[in-house]
Image (cartoon, rainbow, N blue to C red):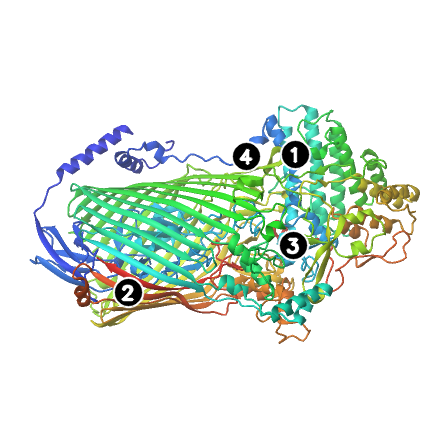
Amino acid sequence: MHKIIFPYQKTLAAGALALLLGTSSCSFFETEAVTDPNNISIESVLQNANQSQINALAVGLEASLRLGHVSNAPNNQVVGTFGREVVVMAGTESRWYTELLGTRSATLDDAAYYNAAYSDFARVRRAAQIFRESAQNAQILTAPQKAGAAGFARTYEALSKLHILILQGGEGSTDPNAGGIRINLDDIRKPGKFVSYAEALTHLRQLLDQAAGELDQAGSTFAFPLSSGYANFNTPADFKKFNRALAARVALYQKDYAGTLTALGQSFYSRTAALTLGPKITFDPGAANNSGNPYFQLSNSNAATVVTVPDNFQAEAETGDTRLNKVALRTTPRRVGTGPTAVDGNYEPRVFASQTTPLDIIRNEELLLIAAEARAMTNDYAGATLDINVVRTAAGLAPTVLTSANALDVILKERRYSLFYEGHRWHDLRRTGRLRTEVTPAGVVGVVKPQTLMYSATPFRLYTRMERPVAEKQWDIANP
Amino acid sequence: MKKILLLFSLMLFSALLQQVVAQDRSISGRVTDRATGQGLPGVTVLVKGTTVGASTNADGSFSLSVPASATTLTFSSIGYTSIDRPIGSDATINIGLAADTKQLGDVVVTGLASSIKRENLANAVTTISAKELTGSTRPVSVDAALSGKVVGANIAQTSGAPGGGVAVQLRGISTINGSSQPLYIIDGVYAVNEAIGNGAGSAAFSGASSGTTRTTQDNPLNRLADLNPNDIESIEVLKGPSAAAIYGTRANAGVIIIRTKRGAAGQTRVSLTQDIGFSRAIRLLGKEDWTPEKIDKFYSGAAAAAEKAELAAAQSAGKIYDYEKEVFGNTGFLRNTGLSISGGTDRTKFFASASTSDEEGIVKNTGFQRNSVRLNLDQKIGQRLDLGISSNYINSNNRRGYTGNDNRGISLGYTLAYVPSYKELHKNELGVFPDAPTGDNPLAVVERAINEEETNRFIQTGSATLRIIDKENSSLRLTAQGGVDFSNSAAILALPADLQSSRNSNNPGAVRFARNNFLNTNLQAFLIYDWKLLDNNLSLTSQLGTVRLDLNQDLTYTQGVGLAPGPLTPNRGSIITQDAFLQRESDVGFIGQQEMNFKDQIIATAGVRFDKSTRNGDPEKLYAFPKASLAVNVANFEFWTVDQVNQVKLRAAYGETGGPAFFGATFSPLGPISTGGRGGFLPSTLVGNAGIEPERATELEFGADLGFLENRVTLEASFYNKEVKNLVNTFVLAPSTGVSSIRAFPVGDLRNRGIELALGVTPVRSDNFSWTSTTQYWHNRSEVTRITVPTFITGTGFGSAFGRNYFKLGESPSRWYGVPANATTNPDTPSNLTRYEDAQPDFQMSFLNSFTVLKSFDISFMVHWKNGGYISNLSRLLQDEAGTTVDWSDPSGRNDGQTIGQFRAGQAGVDARQFIEDGSYVRLREASIYYSVPSGVRTSLFKNYVQNIRVGVSANNLLTFTDYTGYDPEVSNFGATSNFAQVDVAGYPNTRRLFFHLGIDF
């Protein structure tokens, strides 16, 4: 007993109890602080973490990127719906094929389940911050090891923010309330204001460049383990190639084509390497605190929720395109809704073979397509043609020729089939001004068939961005 | 400390020696019910102003030895008006007690260790006697049996499943975190009343929530269902802080004190009760059949043709089914058997009971069973020491099936909405269920999916009272009490691998074995000093005490998915997951209280409790919870000469209580996550607040109690203003920080104001006919009066498409907001949403009438009217989307070619109006008629072996009048919620229950 504030009461009561119950008076009155019996605390790792804590934080950071994909509203299904790559026919959640296809309201709900990925991806940034700060304060780490941890963490922070920015959109506007993200987030009680899409991209480039600089200082090995998803990218030097690949993607979105090509040159971009080369998110449903690939679906599943593919994916492809094996005709077609808002699900995605199939973060096929686009935009049509034909050849198609008249439409069409269900289509159309029912009309040489978006004409409607979460809006109202 | 102890024991010992034994004399007699003439057992007979007394035995007889100085005997029994009878020189006293609707003579607990006469009470404390609780009929659980009987309470069943699931809200919204349920104290034990889920709503099962462990959508029952209602003597409801202040730090939501029956000296009394009953759904939603035209609206091309062929075939074979009726339209058989034995001597008294209940649900393979044994023992040791123990063991088993929200297709309400009536879902001759169009076959789910839970529970209390000084004008006693409530629940959830929804799952089949252990222990000790001043005109009671409470929870499960064929155990899964969650809490409190009573004219009480709790940021810091009250019995003053008005009491009470944050509020954990076969840490989306303090409710209550014509007419009126300050809630941060919220933060203040009126009338009181009637009215209004954080979502809605609640300045935290959003018309609402009605009722009323006819028939009924109280109802949308609503094809009112069902489905997300529905109802909640076999007939049949035979018929929820379109306006997909805003998604239909009763006393 430390403070005797009410000695009279305590004495009497303690005496009474001791007499009757024989308990020791001191334990009766003690209420010792309860430490968390279930988890370790953040505070315990921020100062001088040990090696196993550093390792666990790194594993947690890598694992956290999966979260945006494994919630009730997996990211690639949400953006896939916005880009009409897939339709989620959820027998018990009609909002998937009504609200998200635009048949209900001009603005989306700011507090609905389908914005789950926003906060899931935001957790990646926080995990990166905690890891970076813990590593900087860990005496066990050398200066290069700290630099490696910082470069790794900042690259993940950029990935986190990029995912949120894609969901929130806002390209073409300088109004930070028409999309955009917050970029200063280290103090959770004093987050920075929202910045516009363009400012956000500038920030992401800086963040990636800073990370690249840190990776240059990081020596030959990281002080923490990475999973098999980073099989060819688990040293600071190789990880930097991944960092540069992300920089190339961001630069392309910025329309900084020279910067894109510079970054590509430092990345793992290759016209000869496998198209699948690149770091991946791995899945293991059997491991504790891990999960299976959420985009894997049993073929011809008749589950309550079935992901389907609109018919035009098949219909608008070139004959013989081997990338069509990413979808298959269902033996039991599904239809949801009635009348003009009915949606048919005759095809289903078969991109992922099993629950343990990894999910690409960025891969060589995308880098080739980025290269093609950046070269075409800088009038290097010959170089662009070389890049695009690597992709076409791999898809079993004849080579094509890119010109100023067709380059962007051809590249977007190849991106559609190459990167199907990987979270790109909606943003690709949006950033190129083609998010419309008639994406590419007939007659563009090399596109072969007109490209369209199904379920986009009235009573359906296309969205250019996910609604900003209500908690963000309310925060700004309360903190002007 | 040791020296003080020694000194104290010496003092105690010398006090014992000083006691002088007085001369006694003996008085005996019999107490009867004035209406029926039958002996009343268990009536307390006390020498007025002392603690000397006895209880009547089974036939109402008593005998006791009283001090020579005694002048008056007080006869009191719950449910009857107390009587003071001068002794004079009588050796025999026979007396009849009249039933009292207001129980003015009851004693009510105002301190943890002392009590006060109801007529001197400064608060409106509701007392429910055993007779009122279950004397009429048998609601599904003890808390459900309070519905409509407690003025100021909002009580709703959250599930119609066997065993129930009940939410109780006293005087408005007390907190906005957690479930805001009152504290339940059973014989002094802090009872486990957690409604902890088992995971039925988790991703591996119904998928209602994306959570993988325990979810808010598991549809659990609350543990009060374990208590055998027949064991209960009385329930006291301390509704607000002014009455509950002495319970301190956990009493913000009110306190419900349950006392179980105890033995009475005299003849051993054996009671046998047998109830047999039936339950049926209050209503079913119905369905609309299909036509080829309707099929064309849902299907096209070859699929449409195939469906039409299937429809035609089904029609010609006469195989159009009503699956809702097959699943929810059954009759549940209900059986309760109870046996109790009570009796004893002056020194040893016992009450023992055994009961068994078996209540089938209206869905096959669902049910609730409870077996309970109890022994309550009181023993006097010498002249100064009284000991009491209560032991209760309960074994209960509930099978609830899968209902409510769902993302997988197994929830019955969900799949039934989506199944067209021409589909064949019945088992074929091979015993195989055909596949449903989507999700799962509800008939297969009923037969094959498992959701059952067995609970073993011990509730044990012990108490000791030591009378240190025992004089007429001065008595000092020491009371100590300790209790343990241990509950272990073992749940099995299973979906076999060959169920349709399992076959369509990546990892077919799921089994979970869940174990939830709760251990509550509490100890308290009080010194109570009763003394008198001013020629005995001023009675004083002083008390000092201390309490300690420890709460432990261990929640674990093992789950296997991807099951190999064979027995349903987790270790046969291809993916096995485990989870363990531990919770430890301790509170310590110190209490002092002073009561003063001047000639029953002016009664004043003041007290304070100091509490510390490990839930707070500083576990060592003491928080003070004061209280003070004043009651003035105007009619007891000498100047009062209006004989027709026998009671005029004006009262005022103030008190404060607390609500400590919650376990873990101070933690900022790194949770487990793994990848690549390595374990890792991930910062939680919640961060702790190391400085969190308890929220505090303050309440000022005013009231007047009037009694006319010897309490033939009584009126009890109360007004309260309850303010909850520094409400602890998550502080919602900008989610892009990666932190959704600070777990616990003082977010603002909330005010609840309300009025409670209770009018009791005995229009007729004669030998052959008596009628008592109670009419109660109450309402509450809540408003946020201060907010320190951004406006945030509270409650548990499904989004603005269907209705959400916000914590917003100047509004009720249970008000609904929803689409459409419009910045012009709704500039000030959150996200410019449309402002809809409040989930809180405008008011509630109840009418309770009881009649006794020819001393043999007891007839009673209670009508409960809830006016207003809006519910977010998604049930009809499911049917509208599937084309199965009863009126789906109705084209009336539409000129755009759509049917009403199509239109409504299309309005989802556009306009929330159709989902935010008025939950008003008028319900004949209880009705009963009992017949007691007259003593002449009884003795001619059974001689004197049988003391009483009673038969009866009763009903619960017999009639309901409501415009609500769901199964029943008492519903909640999320169970008990803090703001009482309910969401309805295809839950287990609520039931009406009909019983036949037989009671025999030996």
Residue holding disc 1: B676
Are the residues at dot 3 and dot 4 in contact (C-beta closer than 8 Å)? no
Quick one: label 1, few (<14), some, or many (20+) residues within 10 Å? many
Q: Nearer the viewer, residue B176 or B317?
A: B317
Give the image quarter of residue B552.
top left
Checking the image for residue B897, the label placed there is none
Residue B632 in the figure: left or right of residue B832: left
Spot the residue most to the front: B429
Secondary element at tag 2: strand
Q: Visible in this render: residue B917?
A: yes
User: Rounded to the nearest whole Å, what is the CA distance between mark 3 and mark 4?
Assistant: 43 Å
User: Rounded to the nearest whole Å, what is the CA distance between mark 3 and mark 2?
Assistant: 55 Å
Residue holding disc 2: B951
Image position, residue B755 (x, y; %): 39, 63
Q: Nearer the viewer, residue A250 or A47?
A: A250
Image position, residue B211 (x, y; %): 57, 46
